[in-house]
Amino acid sequence: MSLPKCPKCSSEYVYEDGNLLVCPECAYEFSANDLDEQERIIKDANGNVLSDGDTVSVIKDLRLLLKTSG
Ligand SMILES: [Zn+2]
């Protein structure tokens, strides 16, 4: 299993429910796509030295790309 931990309480017992991931410990529901998107943005922000304005535009571009491709 390669499910992520709950972003809210760090529980390891997250399970899949359709397209959602559900944490049985705090009942938090989230989507794997959201986590993936966050990871990409963090890696991108860390991998490139950008000014604040540039970081914002990169994040906006990523969101647009993900939305149009999904
Ligand atoms: Zn949880």
Image (cartoon, rainbow, N blue to C red):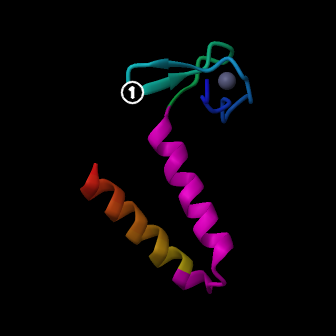
Give residue 27's position: percent from left, percent from top.
59, 17
Residue that numbered label 1 is attached to = 19
Residue in view at x 55 percent, y 77 percent = 55
Q: Secondary structure at mark 1?
A: loop
Segment colored magenta = 31-54
Residue lying farthest to the front in this orientation: 1
Query: Is residue 53 depicted above or below 66 in this figure?
Result: below
Q: Quadrant of ligand 1?
A: top right
Residue lying farthest to the left in this orientation: 68
Residue in view at x 47 percent, y 75 percent = 58
Dividing the picture into quadrants, the one containing residue 65 is bottom left
Judged by its main secondary structure, the magenta piece is helix
Residue in view at x 61 percent, y 23 percent = 1
Give residue 28's position: percent from left, percent from top.
58, 24
Asked whether residue 34 is drawn in magenta, I would say yes
Query: Is residue 47 depicted above or below 63 in this figure?
Result: below
Query: Is residue 61 depicted above or below 33 in this figure?
Result: below
